[in-house]
Image: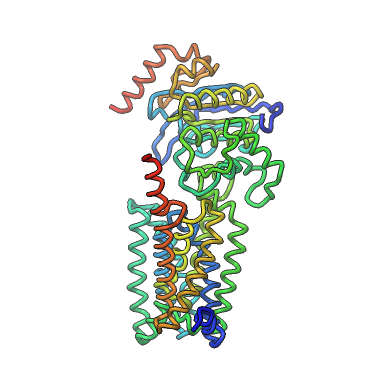
């Protein structure tokens, strides 16, 4: 089988593969740019915690209405935002810092969510909620993911200056009359929206991977934030493509394959990336020594 | 200079103003006036409340009691150079973009950042001696270069009143000289300058007015009259009493 065949024929032959690719790519285009800001704002753990926070909401929706997308979505958004606000409050009002406060909520959410799903559903249902059904995306799921990606990209375009200013120098922004908290809230809502729309594709456990890994990798290839955003989106799409192909040809589960592909890209970037990768650092150290 | 021209006079009055946070007063009962076009240095021992006072004048902190009044100027006419702490130096952004933030009040979050503004950024960079550095990433700048860039941002704001909080901390003397010359030029244009400083020699050489602070105003007026041994000793004693 030629390389072209290996890469293209699964998508030519099977509708579900095409939908899987479309869904995963759309998710990448929305989530990865957000991930760049999560990494820059040192909110990576918070992103992870929020992806687990949506689980009890999704599970509650599932308990109440079965596999109704709307119910699960609504539940996910409510608990996702609730955890973000609660954890923020706890860290503001008590001596507990944000990282521990988020970790606590994330563990509680995960436990609660798994419990809720197990109450009514089978193990299969639990697996689908945790790991997604990228190979079984229906029209509603695809529509949701594409709408979410579009809204995210448009919002990022509009809020870009505010996001950068709030991240770079929040004191200056405040003094110059900009509204930092509004931007922060809008950003959190975009993150929750992406996590919730993505759970059908990759599952609540894995969806944050497509948000974080391409973004973390992009940092090693371009100097500026403006460059990292499109690169992260492209790397996410590429990981989706490779992951789906590997899963197809070697009969492996699809969502872990996608995330592991993103992981390989990340490891390669850490090793060989020209902006602060390990090779780059050692080359510079040797250069400085002479 | 950058967006130069004669300034409308701006006068800042404080009446029994006290500032602090979380219920603790850091500086109390400050009364006095920063006259239009004046150049005042705020000095005092560590913990004297100098940064807090600057934040209060800027409006970042509300007074716990008393008031701050601005005549002939609004909040938009004040520019503040804080101690570098809140800036995220590792953010991947170019010097040009950092300096461009200075145009925020004119351009805001959504208006177009056009050619005239871009040229102002170039002029500001040239004024601080960073003419070719626009494309460099902020994280690669030395301490002195970063301070120059922050100064350029301050210039771009084109404000009537410049409030600087320890602008020369950990900065090389060459940079201090250059930036001091710039401050002098701003003052010559009629802008009001207020700076928190530690180097009393610098203050004596360049600042006609001084406010000596140690949780309360110890003395405020002509530098020569304020910076005498008696006042400095009082300031130190006040600080020691607080610590005891």
Residue A206 or B57: which is nearer the viewer?
A206
| Residue B208 screen position, x and y as percent | 55, 16
Residue B66 position within the rendered picture, expressed as x and y whole percent measured from the top left: 51, 32
Residue A200, above or below B83: below
Residue A210, position as x, y percentages in the image? 46, 68
Question: Is residue A53 in sight in this rendering?
Answer: yes
Q: Quadrant of residue B34?
A: top right
What residue do we see at 38% from left, 81% from top? A127
Residue A225 in the image: x percent, y percent?
Answer: 53, 53
Q: How is the image coloured?
A: rainbow
Q: Is residue A206 left or right of residue A176?
A: left
Residue at the spot 56% in from the left edge and 54% down from the top edge = A226
Quarter in which the C terminus of chain B is drawn: top left
**Residue A194 or residue B97, whichever sits in front:** B97
Corner quadrant of residue B152: top right
The front one of B118 and A13 is A13
């Amino acid at each position: 089988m030629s390389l072209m065949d290996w890469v293209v024929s699964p998508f030519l032959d099977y509708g579900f593969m095409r939908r899987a690719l479309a869904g995963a790519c759309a998710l990448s285009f929305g989530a990865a740019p957000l991930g760049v800001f999560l990494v820059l704002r040192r909110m990576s753990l918070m992103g992870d915690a929020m992806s687990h926070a949506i689980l009890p909401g999704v599970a509650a929706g599932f308990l109440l209405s079965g596999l109704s997308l709307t119910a699960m979505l609504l539940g996910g958004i409510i608990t996702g935002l609730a955890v973000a606000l609660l954890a923020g409050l706890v860290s503001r009002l008590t001596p507990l810092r944000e990282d521990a406060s988020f970790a606590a909520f994330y563990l509680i959410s995960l436990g609660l969510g798994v419990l809720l799903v197990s109450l009514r559903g089978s193990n299969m249902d639990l697996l689908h909620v945790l790991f997604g059904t990228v190979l079984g995306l229906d029209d509603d799921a695809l529509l949701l993911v594409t709408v979410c990606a579009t809204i995210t990209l448009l919002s990022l375009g509009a809020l870009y200056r505010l996001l950068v200013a709030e991240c770079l120098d929040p004191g200056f922004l405040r003094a110059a009359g900009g509204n930092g908290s509004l931007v922060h809230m809008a950003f959190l809502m975009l993150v929750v929206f992406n996590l919730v729309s993505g759970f059908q594709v990759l599952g609540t456990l894995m969806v944050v991977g497509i948000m974080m890994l391409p973004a973390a990798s992009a940092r090693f290839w371009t100097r500026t934030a403006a460059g990292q955003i499109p690169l992260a989106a492209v790397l996410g799409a590429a990981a989706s493509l490779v992951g789906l192909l590997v899963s197809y040809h070697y009969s492996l589960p699809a969502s872990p394959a996608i995330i592991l592909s993103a992981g390989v890209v990340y490891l390669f970037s850490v090793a060989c990336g020209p902006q602060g990768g390990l090779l780059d650092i050692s080359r510079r150290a040797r250069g400085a020594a002479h | 200079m950058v967006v130069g021209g004669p300034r409308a006079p701006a006068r800042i009055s404080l009446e029994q103003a006290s500032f602090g946070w979380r219920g603790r007063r850091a500086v109390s009962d400050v009364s006095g006036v920063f006259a239009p076009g004046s150049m005042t240095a705020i000095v005092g021992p560590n913990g004297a409340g100098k940064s807090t006072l600057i934040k209060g004048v800027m409006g970042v902190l509300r007074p716990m009691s008393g008031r701050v009044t601005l005549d002939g100027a609004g909040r938009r006419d004040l520019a503040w150079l804080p101690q570098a702490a809140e800036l995220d130096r590792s953010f991947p952004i170019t010097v040009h973009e950092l300096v461009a933030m200075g145009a925020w009040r004119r351009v805001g979050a959504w208006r177009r950042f056009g050619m005239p503004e871009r040229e102002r950024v170039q002029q500001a960079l040239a004024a601080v001696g960073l003419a070719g550095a626009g494309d460099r990433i902020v994280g690669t700048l030395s301490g002195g270069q970063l301070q120059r860039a922050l100064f350029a941002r301050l210039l771009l704001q084109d404000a009537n009143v410049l409030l600087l909080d320890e602008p020369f901390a950990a900065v090389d003397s060459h940079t201090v000289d250059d930036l001091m010359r710039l401050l002098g030029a701003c003052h010559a244009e009629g802008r009001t300058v207020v700076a928190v400083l530690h180097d009393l020699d610098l203050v004596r050489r360049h600042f006609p007015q001084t406010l000596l602070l140690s949780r309360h105003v110890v003395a405020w007026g002509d530098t020569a009259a304020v910076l005498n041994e008696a006042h400095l000793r009082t300031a130190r004693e006040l600080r020691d009493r607080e610590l005891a």
